Image (spheres, rainbow, N blue to C red):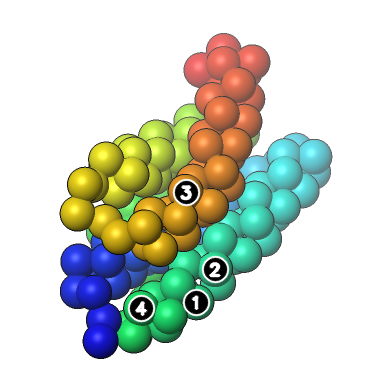
Amino acid sequence: MAETGDVTTLNTLITTLIDSIEGYETSAGDIRDPALAQRFTARAQERRRAVTDLQESVRRLGGNPADDGSIAGGAHRMFVNLKQAVTGSDDKAIVNEVERGEDYLKGKFEAALKDEGLSGDARGAVQQAWESVRSGHDEMSRLKHSMGG
């Protein structure tokens, strides 16, 4: 039997990570600097592994794992696309948006880790995915600041 709270929490994180993957892929296609595009592509691949691991955890808990991004993520991507069209895909603006997304993702994971109702198995899965999130957040924050953002 699925632990409803655990499955809900993990699925929320999965959809947010999928949004992150799509954001990185979009940004990799729009950014002018090939080295940054490569970094974004690598982050997207890393996030795919985190999604797969969380989906497996949901299955082990007896739930059905999410496999699509959120509606809010779709709206965010449309806003980013509109902003890029207006700003001409400025690399600094793209990095700022990616870092903003990382802040949001970091907040979601921190909230999940503070959830005292989360089972040990679910907490372990969140902690493992958190390593990717924290690393990505820190990298994008440093990148933003190095660009004067």
Gap between marks 2 and 1 measured at Cα? 5 Å
What is the secondary structure assignment of the residue under circle 1?
helix
Within 10 angstroms of label 1, few (less than 14), some, or many (20 or more) residues? some
What is the secondary structure assignment of the residue under circle 3?
helix
Whether the residues at callouts 2 and 1 have beta carbons within 8 Å, the answer is yes
Seen from the viewer's position, the closer of residues 120 and 125 is 120
Gap between marks 3 and 1 measured at Cα? 14 Å
Judged left or right of residue 34, residue 53 is left
Gap between marks 3 and 2 measured at Cα? 11 Å
Q: Quadrant of residue 100?
A: top left
Q: Which residue is mark 3?
A: 127
What is the secondary structure assignment of the residue under circle 4?
loop
Q: Is 18 drawn above or below residue 64 in the view shown?
A: above
Whether the residues at callouts 3 and 1 have beta carbons within 8 Å, the answer is no
Q: Quadrant for the N terminus, please.
A: bottom left
Q: Is 56 drawn above or below residue 108 in the view shown?
A: below
- Amino acid type, callout 1: Glu
Numbered tag placed on residue 56 in the rendering: 1
Q: Which residue is mark 4?
A: 61
Within 10 angstroms of label 2, few (less than 14), some, or many (20 or more) residues? some
**In this rendering, which labeled residue sits more in front, label 1 or label 4?**
4
Q: Which residue is mark 2?
A: 53
- Amino acid type, callout 3: Gln
Residue that appears at 32% across and 83% down: 63
